[in-house]
Structures are given as structure tokens and as C-alpha cells.
């Protein structure tokens, strides 16, 4: 089987079946689309969890494999919608994944603790390209900047 561009197929379905015109969406339309897709994906994740015996207070340790897989495919549909509305095609998704994968490997290699390298205000990692935070100078009292605001934090 040749390579399948699932994001392109999902976009085609959204446009042809549901009438979405992503290029014509206003910011308000995009926000609404993002909101309901995140809610739908979250709901599908809960449905996926329900296909397992995850509750520590119950004795069942089952995994309904086929039903779980079906719920995860539902999640994937909503995630692809989010990629589409954010302007990402399959190539951009793969490139972003590969970049983030390497960053996660590098973080673990460097002893990442999930706390000391994050802005105390917005909680974004300082090495996150989307963050506009600085970790300040820890030797002089550690002043951190988040956007244009400065916040003092302890180390």
C-alpha cells in the first residue's frame, strides 16, 4: 500500500461532507471549531478509557482491544481536524513531531525534571519556541520574564 495522507483525506471529508471552508473561517469560527474538536477528542479519550479495567478499586483488568482501537481512531479524526484548522498538513505534522521527539530525547538525556526549566508564571519550558519567557539570572535573585511582564520566583 502506498503512502496515505490522512490529514489531506480528513480535510477533504470536512470540506465536502460537512461544508467547512478553512480558508474562509474567521477567528471566531476557528475558536469554535477548535473548542468543539478538543471537547470531542477528550470525550473520545474517556470512551477509550472506558474500554479498559483501569479502576484500582475494581477487580477487572480487561482491555476491549477492538473497541479501544475504534475509540482511538475517533480521537485521531478530531486531532486531524485540529491540525487542519491550525494550518498544518501531514508534512508539517511529521516535521513538528520529529522536532519535538528529538527535544524530548535531549531533555531526558540532560536530566529533565519538568520544573526547573519552566517559567514559574506560564509554566512553559524555556526551550519551547512558542514561549516568550526568560529564566533570568539565578545568581542575582532570578527575575523571570513571561511576555512583557516580569515576575519574581524562587528556585
Image (cartoon, rainbow, N blue to C red):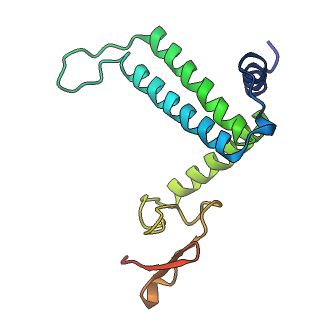
Residue at figure coordinates x 52%, y 29% from the top left: 41
Q: Residue extending furthest bottom?
A: 140
**Front residue (pair 75, 30):** 30
Give coordinates of residue 105: x percent, y percent: 57, 50
Residue 130, compared with residue 94, is above or below; it is below
Residue at figure coordinates x 52%, y 81% from the top left: 136
Residue at figure coordinates x 48%, y 68% from the top left: 119
Give coordinates of residue 3: x percent, y percent: 80, 21
Give coordinates of residue 110: x percent, y percent: 52, 61
Residue 30, compared with residue 150, is above or below; it is above
Name the image quarter holding the N terminus: top right
Name the image quarter holding the C terminus: bottom left
Rendering quarter of residue 151: bottom left
**Front residue (pair 107, 142):** 142
Rendering quarter of residue 131: bottom right
Residue 40, compared with residue 155, is above or below; it is above
Q: How many marks do you count on the picture?
A: 0
Give coordinates of residue 71: x percent, y percent: 50, 18
Residue 118, compared with residue 70, is above or below; it is below
Amino acid at each position: 500500500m502506498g503512502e496515505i495522507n490522512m490529514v489531506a483525506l480528513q480535510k477533504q471529508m470536512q470540506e465536502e461532507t460537512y461544508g467547512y471552508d478553512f480558508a474562509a473561517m474567521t477567528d471566531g469560527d476557528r475558536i469554535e471549531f477548535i473548542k468543539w474538536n478538543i471537547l470531542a477528542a477528550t470525550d473520545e479519550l474517556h470512551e477509550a478509557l472506558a474500554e479498559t479495567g483501569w479502576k484500582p478499586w475494581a477487580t477487572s483488568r480487561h482491555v476491549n482491544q477492538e473497541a479501544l482501537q475504534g475509540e482511538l481512531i475517533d480521537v485521531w479524526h478530531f486531532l486531524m481536524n485540529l491540525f487542519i484548522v491550525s494550518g498544518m498538513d501531514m508534512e508539517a505534522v511529521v516535521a513538528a513531531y520529529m522536532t519535538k521527539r528529538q527535544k524530548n530525547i535531549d531533555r531526558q538525556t540532560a536530566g529533565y525534571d519538568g520544573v526547573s526549566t519552566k517559567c514559574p508564571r506560564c509554566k512553559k519550558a524555556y526551550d519551547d519556541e512558542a514561549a516568550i519567557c526568560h529564566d533570568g539570572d539565578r545568581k542575582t535573585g532570578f527575575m523571570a520574564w513571561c511576555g512583557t511582564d516580569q515576575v519574581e520566583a524562587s528556585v
